[in-house]
Amino acid sequence: MPVVVYGDILSGNCYKIALLFSQLGIAHEWREVLVTRGETRTADFLLKNPAGQIPVVVLDDGTVLTQSNAILHYFANDSELLPADNLLRTRVLEWQFFEQYSHEPTIAVRRFINRFLGLPEARQAEFDAKEAGSYRALDVMEKRLGEHEFLVANRYTLADISLYAYTHVAQEARLDLDAYPGIRRWLNTIAAQPGYIDME
């Protein structure tokens, strides 16, 4: 059996896996699972991931992997996308923890409310409350990318894949990147990487 990915390509966390697999040439089967249809809450899906989250990857021996950045590490081990040097690996992890704790909870949530829910009045206050945190996260990225080509070691790594996923669709969260030239240059650089695929 091939590696099977359960996810939604329009989810940034799932897109990370699709992008990595394309760039590393990893054969897989993609099975669509949509949060908006409640498909992550079914009994069958919860057997795979009791947290009810996508993406989920099932290996050919039945082993289940969850959490997007952990999945990236599993498949990128011994590749150019994950530095062998321990300090540089730690720098990759620093950016990935930043992505999950400061970037994704603001930018991705605004995007979800706007794009997938249609910005309902009941979620307007939450949407607005995420704006300042979204720009704080972008400010942190801009400080690095205004002076460096990539996030870690001036080379393309998993850190870039993780942060690219939701940053490149920031406009869908109604965020303006005009004041972030470093980020805009970096987005173009990532899109020019070998094996790149778009989200849609």
Image (tube, grey):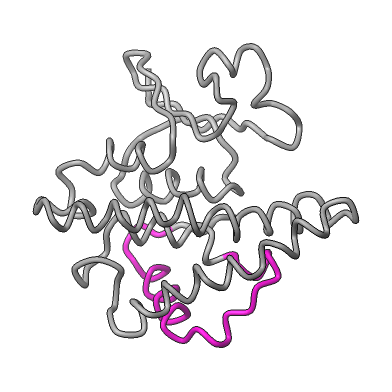
The front one of 171 and 144 is 144
**From what the image shows, is residue 72 above or below residue 183?**
above
Rendering coords of residue 181 (x, y %):
46, 86
Tell me which residue sits at (42%, 68%) in the image.
191
Give the magenta part as a residue range. 169-196
- 51 sits to left or right of 90: right
- 86 sits to left or right of 73: left
Q: Quadrant of the N terminus?
A: top left
Tell me which residue sits at (16%, 58%) in the image.
88
Q: How many marks?
A: 0
For residue 194, what is the image quadrant? Answer: bottom left
**From what the image shows, is residue 100 above or below residue 6?**
below
The front one of 110 and 19 is 110
Rendering coords of residue 118 (x, y %):
83, 55
Tell me which residue sits at (59%, 64%) in the image.
169
The front one of 197 and 49 is 49
Rendering coords of residue 72 (x, y %):
34, 42
Q: Is residue 183 magenta?
A: yes
Tell me which residue sits at (60%, 55%) in the image.
108
